[in-house]
Image (cartoon, grey):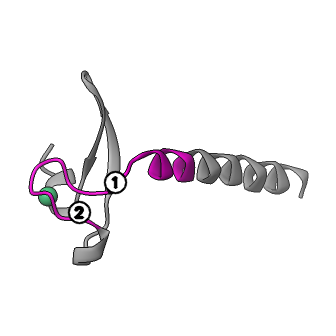
Amino acid sequence: MQGVKQEIIQNMQILKKTQNIQTSVSRVECYVCGKGLEDGHSISAKTLANGIVLFCDVHYSLQ
Ligand SMILES: [Zn+2]
């Protein structure tokens, strides 16, 4: 049981970090098409050579 508890704590820390990244960006939108959460797309961050870039569900799989 202790291992499971540890895993939950780690997941929560990752979640907190992800939220910090999202709040530091003024508008969450796709780097390619410019569509964002308001357009019904799920946005995911990907770390590229030039920094953290956001992609929608469509373009994330293409990168
Ligand atoms: Zn896109």
The residue at 31%/70% (across/down) is 37
| Residue 28 sits in quarter | bottom left
- Contact (Cβ within 8 Å) of mark 2 with mark 1: yes
Q: Which residue is tagged 1?
A: 44
The circle drawn on residue 9 is: none
In terms of secondary structure, where does tag 2 sit?
helix
Instruction: Give the secondary structure at mark 1.
Output: strand
Q: Main secondary structure of the magenta part?
A: loop
Q: Nearer the viewer, residue 28 or 61?
A: 28
Q: Which residue is mark 2?
A: 57
Image coords of residue 31 (percent x, y): 17, 47
Magenta segment: does it hold 21?
yes
Q: Quadrant of residue 49?
A: top left
Q: Is mark 2 within 8 Å of ligand 1?
A: yes
Give the amino acid at mark 2: Asp
Task: Assign the C terminus to one quadrant of the image.
Answer: top left
Closer to us: 5 or 17: 17
Residue behind label 1 places its C-beta within 8 angstroms of ligand 1: no
